[in-house]
Amino acid sequence: MKKNLFYNIIQEWNGLSLKEKLANLQKFEELNADFEGRKAREIVLKQIQRLDADAEYRFNEPNLIIINNNSVNKNPFKMLENVFHEGFHALCDDYFNNKTDLKTFSQVDKERLIDERRKIDLIYNRAYNERVLTLFSLAYYEEKLVRKETCLYFIYNLLQCYENMADCQKLIEIYHENIGSYYSYETFKNHIDMQYETPSYEEIRKLVDAIDIKIYSDRLREVNTDKNVVQYPQSSTVLRNFERGLEELSKFQNNIIGNQEYVSRQCQNLDESKLLLR
């Protein structure tokens, strides 16, 4: 097993003091920022008003990633997920402000990404008026991209640790939690989006384009970037693992990690992916 910061933090988390936890989250943010080619943000501990938020990146505090006071002692995987998630929002912000290229594992609809950033306030207000803010928080294009990139980046980190099939037993629970987190997100998003008593996200966007933009054009955000969207060299392998991992997970209705057939299939998926990276 090749140890890296991602794996070490998860293994050591419960034995760390609060100060050590924050220091490790800062190291993880700096590692991520270097990988993405952006400026690292400062990890700070604050009270967040939103009850459902463990962390936040704010447009008006672009040098910070804020961790909720009540969240820092949670599951280490979840805390690393929060740091990367908010850091990727920071990367998008830097991209929109013409500071850096947007590096990704997945393919990006650049036109839609920029279009929705320009209209974010209109989309938010329309979702608020239609009482579907939860749908907005799940289906806004940047959010969808961030959720997927978080899962893909963690797969990449696990493949950096993985050396042989014996490592699989040590990594499979982390791998399952990663894939399972994205699977749960997609399932819930699709469920919310298909509720017939409320508009779908695409209907929200159409209403914005047909009505709101004509009335509130002064509320469009400025986006001036000539930076590129660039896929990592390892993208094809990581995406292959991701797609197969989700496929295997969906076959097991109870999603129980102890299912030996499931474990075997996911271990094989990791093993084949690692070979492709060499």
Image (spheres, grey):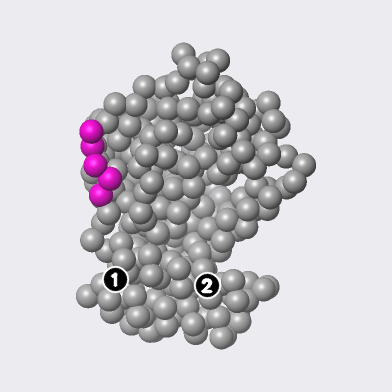
Dot 1 and dot 2 residues touching (CB under 8 Å): no
How many residues crowd mark 2 within 10 Å: few (<14), some (14–19), many (20+)?
few
Q: Residue at x 54, y 48 (%)?
A: 73
**Which SS class for mark 2?**
helix
Magenta segment: 226-230
From the viewer's perspective, is residue 226 above or below residue 8? above
The quarter of the rendered structure image containing the N terminus is bottom left
Residue 174: percent from left, percent from top: 48, 66
Which circle marks residue 2 in the picture? 1
Q: Nearer the viewer, residue 141 or 246?
A: 141
What main secondary structure does the magenta stretch of the protein show?
A: loop
Q: Residue at x 36, y 33 (%)?
A: 93
Q: CA distance from mark 1 to mark 2?
A: 27 Å
Residue 32: percent from left, percent from top: 31, 48
Q: Nearer the viewer, residue 247 or 217?
A: 217
Q: Residue at x 48, y 50 (%)?
A: 147
Instruction: Please state which amino acid type lies under the numbered disc 2.
Output: Glu
Instruction: Please state which amino acid type lies under the numbered disc 1.
Output: Lys
In the picture, residue 221 is in which quadrant? top left
